[in-house]
Amino acid sequence: MHPLVTMIVPGRDVAAYAPAALESLRAQTETRWRALLVDDGSLDDTGAVFASAAASDPRFEVLHHHEARGLGAARNIGLDRIDTPFVGFLDADDELTPAALRRWLATLDESGSDFVAGAYVRSREVDGVYHPGRVQPWVVQATSPARLGVTLAEHPDATANIVAWSKLSRAHVWDDLRFPENVAYEDQVVAQRMYTQARAFDVIPEVVVHWRIRAEGTSITQGKNRLPVLHDYLTALRGGIRVLREAGAASAVVARLDLILAMDLPPLQRIAAQHPDPGYAAALRAFEDELRALPEYADASPDPSLSTALTW
């Protein structure tokens, strides 16, 4: 039976979490999948975990980078090997919900759209066990209620859902699209290109992924207090806005500005206020000045409740 979906699963030094990610694939109610497990130069036993999975289940295939090249490169090497009608992503420290693939595929079968984006929740450690939280307000805005066959003009709030692993795409979406390499936050610009280039896309409110917030704080998204990470983060935000503006998606630019002003800037401003390197605050101020200079800034009206949204 030829698989319908290729899942690209990159991981680096995630041996403690990868078994749960791989088990979430095995537990899918839709079984017609294959998974490319990309060991991105791990120094721990991630490669061994991947190899063990491939030895016990032929649906898994392992690819190795001898040196770390980053999530962008790891995903790209998987994209170069697609031979199925659909493709999705799962980071090797996260978990799919059991019906994710079935729900994604059923939605695309009904709509004929280019891709579908689902909701997701953060998973945090309590007493040694990770527990999924609630769907955050900005994710609700992006994914609820279900909308099939829409465009960005019809649903600009979709641009809040920028993570690669919340989506399932038809393979042709990736014919001329790849992730930036050697940077963090590589999925933001790609997501906005997906929205602007799609003939139509779908959003669904069902939770498809549990996004692990590592207790030891080692994930990229937990390192925004480091100046190089901040630079990558701001570059990604700039790039996403640029893609939307170049596509003439004014309402989507306003939606992104609303979210950036409400959600992204406040925690960065708190870090900048106490950061020992003055370059951190300077970089952030320059970014804020760029936002204020945008014509769409005058129409932005960020929801203050988002800046105080509960993490659970």
Image (cartoon, rainbow, N blue to C red):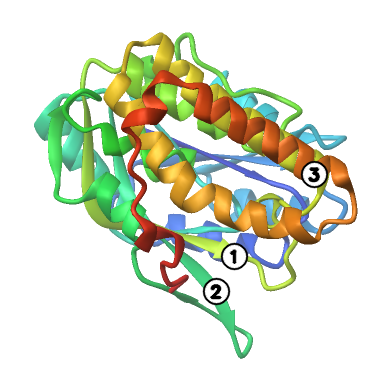
Q: Is the C-beta separation of discs 1 and 3 under 8 Å?
A: no
Q: Amino acid at mark 1?
A: Ile
Disc number lying in front (1 or 3)? 3
Q: Which mark is residue 280?
A: 3
Mark nearer the N terminus (3 vs 2): 2
Q: Label 3's element?
A: helix
| Furthest residue in direction bottom, as rendered | 127
SS at circle 1: strand
163 and 293: which is toward the camera: 293
Locate residue 136 relative to residue 148 in the image: left or right.
Answer: right
- Residue at numbered disc 2: 124
Query: Mark on residue 92?
Result: none
Q: Which mark is residue 213?
A: 1
Q: Nearer the viewer, residue 79 or 303?
A: 303
Q: Residue at x 59, y 24 (%)?
A: 179
Which amino acid lies under the numbered mark 2 shown in the image of this protein? Answer: Arg
Q: Earlier in the sequence, mark 1 or mark 2?
A: 2
* Tag 3: amino acid: Tyr
**Quadrant hosting residue 290:** top right
Labels 1 and 2 touching (C-beta < 8 A): yes
Q: Going by the image, does 106 lie left or right of 69?
A: left
Residue appearing at x 87%, y 45% in the figure: 278
Front in this rendered view, residue 32 or 239: 239
Quarter of the image with the C terminus is: bottom left
Q: Position of residue 67 (x, y in %)?
A: 87, 35
Dot 1 or dot 3: first in sequence order is 1
Q: CA distance from mark 1 to mark 2?
A: 5 Å
Residue plotted at (53% across, 29% down): 291
Q: CA distance from mark 3 to mark 2?
A: 28 Å
Q: CA distance from mark 1 to mark 3?
A: 24 Å
